[in-house]
């Protein structure tokens, strides 16, 4: 398992339980805590991604195949991110009607929800594209 | 990743070249061992520069290392 796969796996381990926690807190009306948990979760995930990209530049840990897989995963994640934003806007419009109002919380939820969608889809796509990984083994 | 139409002799040539390991080949051509595994399994088609590097490592012309699987659709 290479660095990209490990990062993707760790992201899933962080995001999925974190998201379940956010939804549970939201459901029991602890919305402020749910927002903070979501913001902290995404700050941790995004900062980890940033620092891991900056490290290990001297040895070959990222080559043309990794670049191709990362690019494909990014394209899929960006498409779904835009679909999420589109639906977030449409849903607000449908629920409130053209003359209605929405809470500013909606913007916060769309921003961090978009970050969750991007990281979640990117991580899953990375794991799928690498396939069996090291199970092929040295021969 | 999808199975590529490019066939190759990388595995055989590694063994013919002093039983070179996948890691040794990867280090020589500047990629990860996973990429060599994927190329040998036909799961990944290398770029032209990488294909040339691999062929040069074995001291063979590129067409002896990599072969396109089908001639269908090629015009003479």
Image (tube, rainbow, N blue to C red):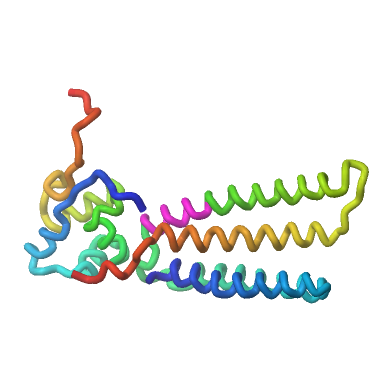
Find out whether residue A65 is within the magenta segment: yes
**Range covered by the magenta-colored residues:** A64-74
Give the residue drawn at x 62%, y 74%: A17
Q: Position of residue A42 (x, y in %)?
A: 66, 69
Residue B35 versus residue A72 in the image, above or below: below
Q: Report the quarter where the N terminus of chain A lies.
A: bottom left
Give left or right: position of A64 versus B54: right
Residue B9 versus residue A13 in the image, above or below: above
Residue A117 versus residue A16 in the image, above or below: above
Q: Position of residue A121 (x, y in %)?
A: 55, 58
Find out whether residue A16 is within the magenta segment: no
The quadrant holding residue B12 is bottom left
Give left or right: position of A58 versus A9: left
The quadrant holding residue A116 is bottom right
Extreme-top residue of the structure: B76
Q: Position of residue A118 (x, y in %)?
A: 60, 58
């Amino acid at each position: 398992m290479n660095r990209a796969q490990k990062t993707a796996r760790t992201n899933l381990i962080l995001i999925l339980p974190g998201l379940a926690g956010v939804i549970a807190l939201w459901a029991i009306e602890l919305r402020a805590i749910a927002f903070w948990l979501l913001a902290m979760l995404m700050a941790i995930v995004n900062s980890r991604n940033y620092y891991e990209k900056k490290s290990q530049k001297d040895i070959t840990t990222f080559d043309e195949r990794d670049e191709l897989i990362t690019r494909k995963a990014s394209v899929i994640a960006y498409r779904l991110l835009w679909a999420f934003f589109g639906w977030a806007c449409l849903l607000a419009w449908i629920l409130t009607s053209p003359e209605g109002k929405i809470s500013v919380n909606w913007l916060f939820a769309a921003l961090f929800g978009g970050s969750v969608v991007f990281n979640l889809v990117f991580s899953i796509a990375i794991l799928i594209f690498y396939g069996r990984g090291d199970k092929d083994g040295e021969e | 990743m999808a199975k590529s139409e490019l066939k190759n002799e990388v595995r055989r040539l590694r063994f013919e070249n002093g039983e070179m390991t996948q890691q040794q080949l990867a280090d020589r051509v500047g990629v990860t061992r996973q990429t060599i595994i994927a190329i040998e399994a036909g799961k990944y088609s290398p770029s032209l520069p990488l294909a040339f590097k691999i062929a040069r490592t074995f001291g063979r012309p590129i067409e002896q290392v990599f072969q396109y699987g089908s001639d269908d659709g090629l015009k003479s």
